[in-house]
Image (cartoon, rainbow, N blue to C red):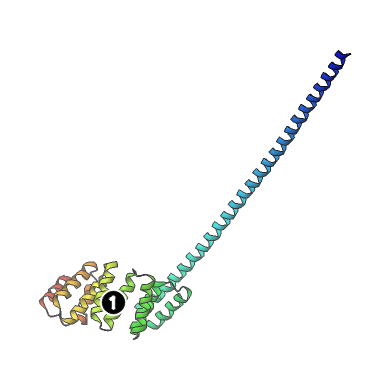
Amino acid sequence: MKSKSFKFRSLALGIIIIIGVVITVSSAIKNNKVKNSIIVANSKAEAASIKSEEIKEQQLKATELKKQQEINQKQKSLEVTWKIGYDQFFKKEYNNAIKTERKVIKEDPTFYKAYAVEGIALAYSGNFEQGMKQIDLSLKLNPSYGYARFNKALTYELYQHYGEAITWYNKALEIEKFEWSYYGIASIYGRKGDVSNTIKYLTLAIGINQSVKNTAKTEEDFNNVRESPEFQKLIISIEN
């Protein structure tokens, strides 16, 4: 009897162990499936998040590109208008040049080139202080703008502030070896009757642009040095 009882208990214990193992394995499989489901869900969520971020980044880039294109288009349009004012100044249409450049400035207060043209047009219209103020605004926005430096020198020369004019012509030459900056200095020395410096700077101007000779031959600013042998020799060498 004891032997049968022992066998029964052993069998029961074995069944219990098997059931326990089955339950443990089943639970492990179930837990693993849950974990896998969570990992997959998290992976999908992360992928969706990355995709969303990529879409946002693409949209942001597209917005920035469109904005930059609009800015570039506006700048091109302002450049065209500025050039109209620039040409009006050289046609001696000073009031029109002033009006045109003010349109540019109204659209873009940082458009430094417009201030330089408006300033010199104002100076030639008889308004020294306002003209100089606008030229200085151009230089405040861009201190290295050679044309504004040149216009400041020209304004000083126009109103007979010759020392300041020479200073600013030289400042303009720091940016660009412009023939008319050299010519401006030469004409100031010509008024003073300084033959040596007149010839020095006029020669530099002609060396850059031969067409300067046509202006020099009839320029009233050189009347005080015109009969000097040096000036005559320069004119003769130019004509030949």
**Can you give x and y, in whole percent of width and height, for residue 26 in the image?**
76, 31
Which is nearer the eye, 169 or 53? 53
Which residue occupies 69% across, 38% down? 35
Please tell me how many numbered marks the rendered image carries.
Answer: 1
Question: Taking 192 as reference, is 19 above or below it?
Answer: above
Which residue occupies 27% across, 74% down? 168
Q: Report which quarter residue 82 is drawn in.
A: bottom left
Residue position for label 1: 153
**Can you give x and y, in whole percent of width and height, for residue 49 in the image?**
63, 50
Q: In screen coordinates, is 144 left or right of 49? A: left
Q: Amino acid at mark 1?
A: Ala
Residue pushed farthest front? 2
Question: Taking 240 as reference, is 48 above or below it?
Answer: above
**Can you give x and y, in whole percent of width and height, for residue 72 in the image?**
47, 65
Which is nearer the eye, 48 or 59? 48
Residue density around tag 1, few if under 14, some if 14–19, many if 20 or more, within 10 Å: many
Quarter occupied by the C terminus: bottom left
Which residue occupies 14% across, 74% down? 196
Q: Report which quarter residue 200 is drawn in.
A: bottom left
Which is nearer the eye, 67 or 27? 27
Regarding residue 91, the answer to whether it shows in the image is no
Q: Report which quarter residue 120 is drawn in.
A: bottom left
Which residue occupies 70% across, 40% down? 37
Question: Taking 221 as reference, is 83 above or below it?
Answer: above
Query: What SS does tag 1 mark?
Result: helix
Quarter occupied by the N terminus: top right
**Can you give x and y, in whole percent of width and height, for residue 133 in the image?**
36, 80
Q: In screen coordinates, is 50 left or right of 30? A: left
